Amino acid sequence: MHIKTVAAILAWLVVALLLLNRIFNSEWVLPIAIALTIVAVLIYFSPRLRKGKKSADKEEKPPSSDQITEH
């Protein structure tokens, strides 16, 4: 399954939980829905975060001795 599909499924699960919360007026559904929303957002943006981290790592590393050429 694709990462965005998993995030979308979690978002729909949150919507279903919130609808059930209106029916049952339960105290534990809202914190679970908030946690699942945070997880869905992190899953959705995780490829972008990893890509950004890799590019930041490339900028921080000095070039290896093989790449340095003397003129």
Image (cartoon, grey):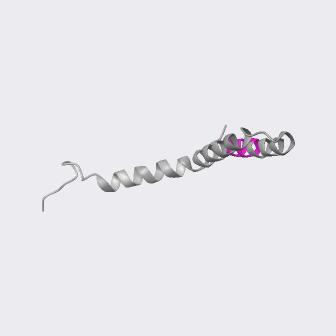
User: Is residue 57 found left or right of 44 in the rendered image?
Assistant: left
Quarter of image, res 20 = top right
Q: Does the image show residue 4?
A: no
Note whether 59 is above or below 44 in the view shown: below
Q: Nearer the viewer, residue 71 or 16?
A: 16
Note whether 32 is above or below 68 in the view shown: above
**Image x and y of residue 6, in percent:** 67, 41
Q: Residue furthest right?
A: 23
Q: Residue 7 lies in magenta, yes or no?
A: yes
Total numbered circles: 0
Specify the quadrant that holds the N terminus. top right
User: Is residue 59 found left or right of 7 in the rendered image?
Assistant: left
**Image x and y of residue 45, in percent:** 57, 50
Quarter of image, res 22 = top right
Magenta residues (range): 5-13
**Image x and y of residue 70, in percent:** 13, 58
Q: Does the image show residue 44?
A: yes
User: Is residue 51 found left or right of 45 in the rendered image?
Assistant: left
Q: Nearer the viewer, residue 1 or 18?
A: 18
**Image x and y of residue 11, in percent:** 72, 46
Q: Residue at x 54, y 47 (%)?
A: 46
User: Is residue 43 found left or right of 71 in the rendered image?
Assistant: right
Q: Residue at x 78, y 41 (%)?
A: 17
Q: Residue furthest bottom?
A: 71
Q: Nearer the viewer, residue 56 or 64?
A: 56
Q: Residue at x 61, y 43 (%)?
A: 39
Magenta stretch mostly in which secondary structure? helix
Specify the quadrant that holds the C terminus. bottom left
